[in-house]
Image (cartoon, helix red, strand yellow):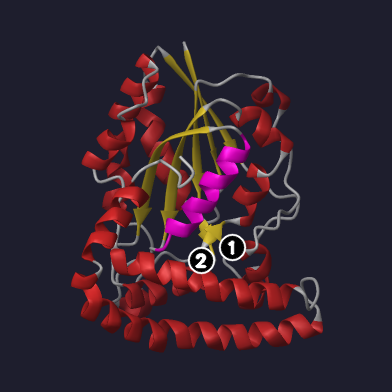
Amino acid sequence: MKHVLVIHYSQSGQLSEIVNNIVAPLASSEEITITHHRIEMETPYPFPWDKKKFFDVFPESFLQIPDKIKPVPSDILNQKYDLIILGHQVWYLSPSIPINSFLKSEDAKKLLNDTPVITVIGCRNMWIQAQEKVKTLLNLCNAKLVGNIALIDRHINHISVLTITHWMFTGKKSRFLGFFPKPGVSEKDINDAVKFALPIQKALLTNNYATLQDSLLKLDAVKIKPFLVLVDKRANVLFSKWANLIYKKGKINTAKRKKLLIFFNYYLLFAIWIIAPLVFIVFLATYFLVYQKININKKYYSSVITKND
């Protein structure tokens, strides 16, 4: 009998749908048992978000500062699993605070030690650098990353900004202004996530994960957009400066911090609507000059290896 643990954190329920669809076919197998654990915070984060609270978690999110989470139940913690499926969101180009808090916990070190892990991402579109940070945290837990599935909003960047903002601040996964596309991962992609179960089941039952990621890639588990890789990297540099500056001003809700967060909000709008289009023009103009590097990056970010491997 193979034991699989599914760990995730989801505010809207979208990621819950994705991971549940992925493991549904596995649960029907007499050779596999599935256990679910949803990460819970001692002080839950709101959904829908209040705008002030959303921006106030930026420094801790980006700097990967953990918050208090509820402990993993002892019956889960004391079981040895053959595979762990870890579903995570991206907050401010980093793994969400709940996921980061879990991966830095003693519970995670015990559960993940010497255990194959498949990461499942559900996000707007920029997940590359967040996944790199997750890789680092998994390495610190002595886990073995064997697969990655990243389902994203397929619409162009600026449309997805408008629709995801509507969803986050209203809690409604509906068409913004009545005619924009629905936000988040499409219903088709969510429903089609069941297709990933077959290669996962084969690898699990044979205990051979060597070619799992290649099999998942053939099913479109990951799509790399070179321009977003560039934006993600550069934004991480700038976010680092902002996050450190704001964090040094004090804890959540302090007056000095609030003032800087207002400036960060305006900066973010300027970066999305002015800087990003200019960077895209430069990217197109230099595309063929960096074509080889782009292909190298696409191959690496599609894989489960780390730069230290």
Q: Is residue 37 left or right of residue 190?
A: right
Identify the residue at image location x=58%, y=56%. Answer: 96
**218 left or right, relative to 249:** left
Q: Residue at x 54, y 66 (%)?
A: 92
Choose top left, top right, bottom left or bottom right for residue 153.
Answer: bottom left
Distance (Cα) linking label 2 and label 1: 6 Å
Q: Which residues are magenta?
A: 126-141
In the image, taking residue 145 as reference, residue 190 lies left or right, namely left
As shown in the figure, which amino acid type bears the numbered disc 1?
A: Phe
Q: Nearer the viewer, residue 96 or 160?
A: 96
Which quadrant is home to the C terminus? Answer: top left
Q: Find residue 123 and report its horizontal and vertical position in percent.
A: 43, 58
How packed mark 1 is, by other alpha carbons closer than 10 Å (few <14, some 14-19, many 20 or more), is some
Q: Quick one: SS at disc 1? A: loop
- Residue behind mark 2: 171
- Which residue carries the number 1 mark? 47
Q: Pointer 2 and pointer 1: residues touching (CB < 8 Å)?
A: yes
Instruction: Give 199 or 243, whichever is nearer the viewer.
Output: 243
Quarter of the rendering containing residue 72: top right
Q: Does residue 223 show up?
A: no
Instruction: Say whether residue 52 is visible.
Output: yes
Amino acid type of the residue tagged 2 in the rendering: Gly
Q: Earlier in the sequence, mark 2 or mark 1?
A: 1
